[in-house]
Image: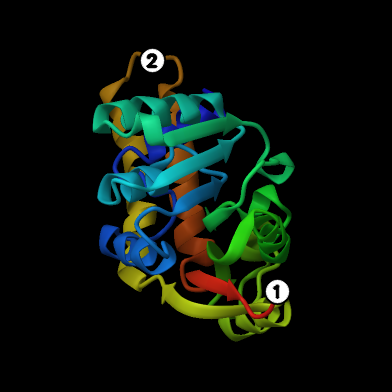
Amino acid sequence: MNRDQMSKIAHANHPIKSPIDDDSVRELLERGIPRPDARVLDLGCGGGEWLLRALSTSPRLRAEGVDISEDALAQAREAASGLGVQERLVLHHEAAADFVSAHSFDLVLSVGAAHAFGGLLPTLAAARKHLAPGGRVLVGDGFWEKEPSPEAVEMLGDLADLATTLDRVTADGWTPVHGHVSTRRELDDYEWACWGSMAAWALDHPDDPDSSQVLSTAATRRSEWLRSYRDSFGFVCLVLRQTSN
């Protein structure tokens, strides 16, 4: 089973592919979208869940998403059609880091996709290229709540603590105007949802040739979470404005 198929199963019950609950997503979008007729870009949009929610609540909003996964973009198109917002959504099949647009955006978001750019600050550099004057960036990335184990660093990368993360962001020319640190419940709900959905799929499809692989992967990922990074990993979303142009 390829990575896209595995991800689709894992996120079946948690379509926001980050440890954030629905109320937090709604508030972050409200704080990030500057006006009802805004133009919004998602760099690394996956199945477009952030954009679909924004389009559903703002009937004058226009949105674009960029992702390398054809399967995820097809899922986004199907969902947009079902919601009746397909005319206001444009999707681009390419690497987010390579995306070039003829116009700028009032909100550029990239949540849980910093790996596509090589880290948080490169993600912000990419977002800056697409930002309209006075626009905002909504970014989400991990940080260390406590000293991580070597195994956690190997799995999740060389993150900083929350204070250092904010220091780096502000030194890069950004001012936070809103933020959300995922709660323990949000973090745990996300992990249980992902690995539980995979395990349930495997048990429901015992004759599928990929069933044993999916069940084994779910068990491995659950163990890594519980034993390696549950007590140290945190996740923060920031709404940012440029400190100066």
Residue type (three-letter) at the residue carrying disc 1: Asn
User: Closer to the camera, 112 or 201?
Assistant: 112
Tag 1 residue:
245
Residue 161 screen position, x and y as percent: 61, 80
User: Closer to the camera, 82 or 117?
Assistant: 82
Question: Residue drawn 49% across and 39% down?
Answer: 46
Q: Is residue 233 in sight in this rendering?
A: no
Residue 6 screen position, x and y as percent: 47, 32
Residue type (three-letter) at the residue carrying disc 2: Asp
Where is 9 relative to 170, above or below? Answer: above
Task: Give neighbour class at mark 2: few <14, some 14-19, many 20+ (Cα, 10 Å).
Answer: few
Q: Quadrant of the C terminus?
A: bottom right
Q: Point out the tag, 1 or 2, that comes first from the N-terminus.
A: 2
Q: Is residue 181 in sight in this rendering?
A: yes
Residue 220 screen position, x and y as percent: 49, 45
Residue 81 screen position, x and y as percent: 31, 26
Question: Residue drawn 43% across and 65% down?
Answer: 32
Question: Residue drawn 60% across and 59% down?
Answer: 132
Q: CA distance from mark 1 to mark 2?
A: 55 Å
Local secondary structure at mark 1: loop
Question: Residue drawn 33% across and 47% down?
Answer: 60
Local secondary structure at mark 2: loop
Where is 63 relative to 189, above or below? Answer: above
Where is 55 relative to 145, above or below? Answer: above
Mark whose residue sits in front, 1 or 2:
1
Tag 2 residue:
208
Where is 20 relative to 239, above or below? Answer: above
